Structure formats: structure tokens, C-alpha cells
């Protein structure tokens, strides 16, 4: 029987970084054209919020179940990376903004995969 150890998500660096990325995206979306409000902006907002939200939700579950929520969080981070490339292609963000956000997302992914590996090895 698997133990019911829970993680305090607010203490997890991956959750904190996910929250920071969500705030960065929220600030960035204020500069997007109004016609993108219900299209790309909405998708980017949902993805960025999903990253830390799934970590928080999964933290109340067993490690096996938490692992699935981490997969969803990682998927959202990769989806957000693609959406940033689309935003750059549409000239909504400049190259430096793209690079800065891609680096943050890559760090989130690296840290999250490391955390996930730790869950799987327990």
C-alpha cells in the first residue's frame, strides 16, 4: 500500500517558479493586441496558470498520482513554449523577451523533471 505523504506545494521551488512564469506571462499579455484576447492570449494564460496549479493539486495526492499531475504541468510548459514562438512569429514579443521566457521555462522543466525522478525513485 502506497503511503499518503503529502508535499507542501508552497515550499516547492517548482511551484514557485511556475507562479513566477505565470506572472511574467500575465504582464506580457497586457501588451498583446486586443484581437488576441480570446485566442493566443487566452491559451497562454491558461497554460502558464496550469503549470503551478497542477503541482498544487497533485501535491495532495499519492506520489503515483502526483506524478500524473506533474506530467500535465510539464505538458503545459511545453505548450507555452510553442505559444511563445507563435507570439514571436507574429511580432508580439521581441527576441530578448522570447529568450528570457524560454530560459525560465527550460529551468522549470529541468527542475520539475528532477523532482519527478525523485518521486519515482522513492
Image (spheres, rainbow, N blue to C red):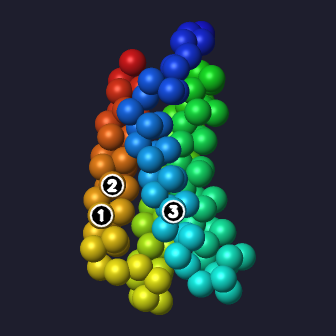
Up the image or down, 86 lies above or below 77; here it is below
Measured in 3D between alpha carbons, the distance from the residue under mark 2 to the one under mark 3, in whole angstroms, is 15 Å
The residue nearer to you, when weighing 26 against 111, is 26
Residue visible at 68% across and 76% down? 37
> Residue 27 — which label?
3
> Residue 100 — which label?
1
Q: Position of residue 11 (x, y in %)?
A: 45, 24
Looking at this rendering, what residue extends furthest in the bottom direction? 90
Residue corresponding to mark 2:
104
Residue visible at 60% across and 62% down? 45
Residue visible at 43% across and 28% down? 12
Tag 1 near tag 2, CB within 8 Å: yes
The residue nearer to you, when weighing 74 against 39, is 39
Left or right? Give the position of 93 relative to 27: left
Q: Quadrant of residue 65?
A: top right
Q: Position of residue 85 (x, y in %)?
A: 41, 78
Residue 104 appears anywhere in the view? yes
The residue nearer to you, when weighing 61 against 53, is 53
Residue 71 appears anywhere in the view? no
Amino acid at each position: 500500500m502506497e503511503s499518503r505523504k503529502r508535499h507542501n506545494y508552497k515550499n516547492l521551488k517548482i511551484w514557485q517558479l511556475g507562479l513566477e512564469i505565470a506572472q511574467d506571462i500575465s504582464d506580457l499579455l497586457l501588451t498583446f493586441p486586443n484581437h488576441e484576447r480570446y485566442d493566443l492570449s487566452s491559451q497562454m494564460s491558461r497554460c502558464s496558470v496550469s503549470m503551478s496549479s497542477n503541482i498544487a493539486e497533485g501535491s495532495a495526492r499519492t506520489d503515483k498520482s502526483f506524478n500524473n499531475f506533474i506530467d500535465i504541468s510539464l505538458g503545459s510548459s511545453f505548450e507555452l513554449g510553442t505559444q511563445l514562438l507563435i507570439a514571436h512569429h507574429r511580432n508580439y514579443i521581441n527576441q530578448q523577451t522570447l529568450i528570457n521566457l524560454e530560459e525560465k521555462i527550460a529551468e522549470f522543466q529541468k527542475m520539475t523533471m528532477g523532482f519527478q525522478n525523485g518521486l519515482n525513485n522513492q
